[in-house]
Image: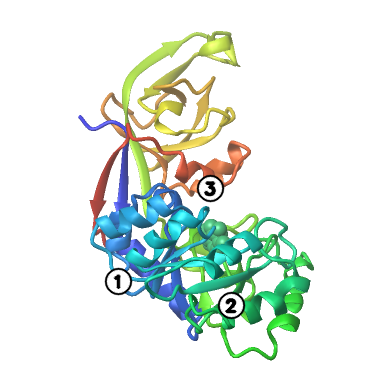
Amino acid sequence: MRLATAEINLTALSYNLRRIKALAPGARVMAVLKANAYGHGLVKIAQHLNDADAFAVARIDEALALRAGGLTKPIVLLEGFFDRADLPILIANNFETIIHDENQLRAIETSQLDARLSVWLKVDTGMHRLGIEPEQFEAFYQRLKGCDNVDPKIKLMTHFSCADDTNSPQTRQQMETFERLVADKPEARCLANSAGVLGWPQSHGDWIRPGLMMYGVSPMLNQVGPEHGLKPVMRLTTRVIAIKTIAAGEKVGYGGRWQSQQKTQLAVVAMGYGDGYPRNARNGTPVVIRDKRYGIVGAVSMDMITVDIGTNPDGIAVGDQVEMWGPALPVEEVAACAGTIPYELLCNVTPRVSYEYLALSD
Ligand SMILES: *Cc1c(COP(=O)(O)O)cnc(C)c1O
């Protein structure tokens, strides 16, 4: 019997990419695949994104894994390279790099390279993580344009810090800062992550960088993927492995974190933080069994979770499938019950979970 399983619906993935293109018809798509494609499986996901224009990852190892998997599209390194010694690897594998600081620029200017490097110049317009300062923009731009090691078709980018909140003035301010800098430049612009694609159509520019939404999940505050016409790609399931009856007043699980108010039945399901399910999920976090929601009770342990099924009106039995998140239960909702964001839950699915790649229609 298969216990913890992540079903990955490749039909939903293609559907979401088409939906993204419809939302940003003028933009090319850099599909963001960092962190094992947000826990969905790097190479398998990339192989099903034929209609993306480029891939993006955070680390050189992730980019090399894509090449080893036979993927030939352009790959952009979102944090750039970390050491001058990385540059030949970038050239040999046709990786494109972000430039976000002086050290990187100087390394490119002072290296002997076999070919020109494709470069994305990243400006910090308010995120205050990576990126050159707006005041540095013109000088960096001119140095890149004048550097023989750099493909003159550079691209210009920035990253939003609050695009998930359409009431925040921050995104508009970031767009204005960026536009002021690049207004007289002919190069392609790239600003929008998923939240930019969904919440800020003015930010679409020439390239977009969707991650989370490709997987059918919403980055927007208090919204879920299907509200944007997206379909969840991952369905995380397991099975009921035991059912027991407890009396009123019994404490359940490590630390006795939950106490029954009346006699009830518990379904023990084979899933825990060892599979990546969040240990912080509070009492009442939903799971779906036989098309109905039930709440978890007691502490999540490494391999098991207890679910209060009351008088078991639906006749839940050992072996029944349990959906922890997926089409019947948005991962956004489970994340909220655990005080985190859906990104973290997806990335945290562990290698103990078996992956099944399926092409499911509705
Ligand atoms: C992760 C990342 C993205 C994708 O963000 P989503 O919110 O998942 O769409 C885009 N751009 C950069 C620079 C990133 O680091």
Camera-side residue: 3 or 150? 150
Mark 1 neighbour density, 10 Å: few (under 14) some (14–19) many (20 or more): few
Hey, what amino acid is under mark 3?
A: Pro
**Which quarter of the frame holds ligand 1?**
bottom right
Q: Residue furthest left?
A: 1
The answer, for residue 290, to whether it is visible in the render is no
Residue underneath mark 1:
50
Frontmost of labels 1 and 3 is 1
Spot occupied by residue 199 in the image (x, y as percentages of width and height):
63, 70
Mark 3 neighbour density, 10 Å: few (under 14) some (14–19) many (20 or more): many
Frontmost of labels 3 and 2 is 2
Q: Is residue 310 left or right of residue 123?
A: left
Hey, what amino acid is under mark 1?
A: Asn
Q: Is the C-beta of the residue carrying label 3 under 8 Å from the nearest atom of ligand 1? A: no
Camera-side residue: 221 or 327? 221
**Does label 3 or label 2 sit earlier along the sequence?**
2
User: Quadrant location of the N terminus?
Assistant: top left
Secondary element type, mark 3: helix
Spot occupied by residue 59 in the image (x, y as percentages of width and height):
46, 52
Spot occupied by residue 247 in the image (x, y as percentages of width and height):
50, 8
Frontmost of labels 1 and 2 is 2
Please state the total of marks drawn on the protein image. Answer: 3
The residue positioned 43% from the left and 18% from the top of the image is 265
Secondary element type, mark 1: loop
Q: Is residue 228 left or right of residue 231?
A: right
Residue underneath mark 2:
144
The residue positioned 57% from the left and 86% from the top of the image is 187
Camera-side residue: 105 or 132? 105
The residue positioned 52% from the left and 60% from the top of the image is 80
Secondary element type, mark 2: helix
Residue underneath mark 3:
342
